[in-house]
Amino acid sequence: MAMDVHLRELRYFVAVADELNVTRAAERLFVSQPALSKQLRVLERQLGFRLFDRVPSGVVLTRQGAALLPAARDLLERWGAGVERARAAAPAGTLVIGMQTAVGRGLQQEALRRFRTAMPGWEVSLRLVGWDDPSGGLADGSSDVAFIWLPVPAGLRTYVLAREERGVAMPADHRLAGLAEIPFAELRDEPFIALPPAAGALRDFWLGLDVREDEPVIGVTANTAEEVFEAVTSGLGVVLVAEGNARLYDRPGMTYRPVKGLPPGELAIAWREGNATPQVLAFIDALRQVTTKV
């Protein structure tokens, strides 16, 4: 005999057993009394025995109905608990973090650990964004937060994580590599590795336009950090770089020297103005805790 009983039918059975009145049970279940009576008859036919007997006040459980009731309650409770466990196991969502360069500096891992503690169930996705999008993916909504270097486009809020001196990365056999510190004036005629024109003010900053009046010589344009440092080691030009990034991207054939006369670069976490979602605020707060501790 097939026993293809649905959870809905078990809920109907338990509700009528609780109320001992089909009309009251139907109101509790938000169904019509005829529909409930029909479903009970279907269930009884499937089971092959009656669950209720009619009495003047409503219904009473038969002996078989009373014997089945604890199992029906148990099944419904177990199903409900299982659904809750399944919901809890599913991620609440994904925080997308855009980045244009490696972050390092003891910031990212510790902030992620604190974020996961504050937002259990949330996943994190890290995505590399080219410099042709100076917003780090925030402008088109493809990132929720972004590690980016100042200056940033309009419409973004920032919290500065690190201020670092700008130096120069150059081929290891460069004519200026023997100097311990290089005056910026010595670099004016050098070909520079430039960010793409779409990077706007960020491109200008890393070409040193904030301290020079002449137009820089552009050796090559690069869209990612890997492209930049590949161009340097290939002898295509020099590039201004933050001190921390010079350590993160150290490679054979390239050397880094401090440069005199340049204001520092600033690494920040950025987010869209008005975006006060719990996950964004939790990640920013995690970074504030990390930088305060450092």
Image (cartoon, rainbow, N blue to C red):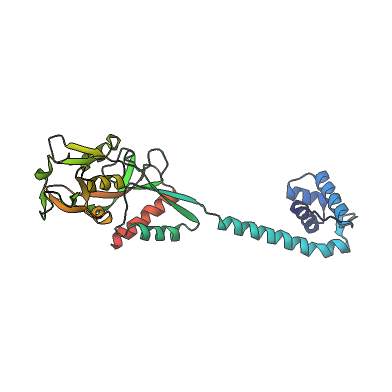
Q: Quadrant of residue 66?
A: bottom right
Q: Position of residue 128 (x, y in %)?
A: 37, 47
The percent coordinates of residue 114 (x first, y second) are 40, 60
Q: Where is residue 180, by image quadrant?
A: bottom left
Would you say 119 lies left or right of 155 here?
right
The residue closer to the viewer here, 184 or 148, is 184
Q: Is residue 234 or residue 102 the one in the foreground?
A: 234
49 in relation to 236, above or below? below
State the quadrant of the N terminus. bottom right
Q: Residue 112, image x and y in percent?
A: 40, 58
Question: Number of callouts in the render?
Answer: 0
Does residue 93 sit above or below 133 in this rendering? Answer: below
Residue 210 locus on image (x, y percent): 17, 40
Name the image quarter holding the C terminus: bottom left
Left or right of 215? Residue 33 is right
Instruction: Say whether residue 200 is left or right of residue 172.
Output: right
Q: Nearer the viewer, residue 244 or 60?
A: 244
